[in-house]
Image (cartoon, grey):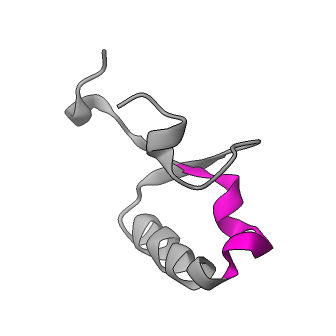
């Protein structure tokens, strides 16, 4: 297991940018901008069924 202090990437579902979640897209873009401002790397996971990490990522 990797402790939090050793992680360096935030993962988001690619679904967050789909038309299905258009109302949340503006908020997502704000989050991405803040992550960029602080130099935090983020990536998108493809082929997820929804946007919630708790449904497809181990915690």
Question: Is 40 displayed left or right of 49 in the figure?
Answer: left
- Determine if residue 37 is in view: yes
Q: Residue 19: percent from the left, percent from the top?
A: 78, 75
Q: Does 43 lie within the magenta span?
A: no
Please tell me which residue is depicted at 58% across the width and 55% down the height of the picture.
51
Q: How many marks?
A: 0
Is any atom of residue 10 visible in this view? no
In the image, taking residue 30 as reference, residue 6 lies left or right, namely left
In the rendered image, the vertical position of residue 15 relative to residue 1, given as above or below? below
- Residue ID at (69%, 54%): 14
Residue at figure coordinates x 70%, y 58% from the top left: 15
Question: What segment carries the magenta color?
Answer: 12-22
Specify the principal SS of the magenta part: helix
Name the quadrant containing residue 46.
Answer: top right
Residue 15 is one of the magenta-drawn residues: yes
Q: Quadrant of the C terminus?
A: top left
Observer-nearest residue: 52 or 6? 52
Q: Position of residue 49 (x, y in %)?
A: 69, 46
Classify the position of the N terminus by image quarter. top left
Return the x and y of residue 31 as percentages of the image width and height. 45, 72
> Is 37 rendered above or below residue 30?
above
Residue shown at 34%/34% (left/top)?
A: 7
């Amino acid at each position: 297991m990797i402790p939090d202090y050793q992680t360096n990437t935030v993962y988001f579902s690619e679904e967050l940018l789909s038309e299905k979640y258009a109302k949340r897209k503006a908020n997502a873009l704000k989050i991405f901008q803040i992550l960029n401002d602080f130099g935090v790397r983020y990536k998108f996971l493809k082929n997820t069924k929804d946007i919630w990490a708790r449904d497809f990522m181990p915690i």
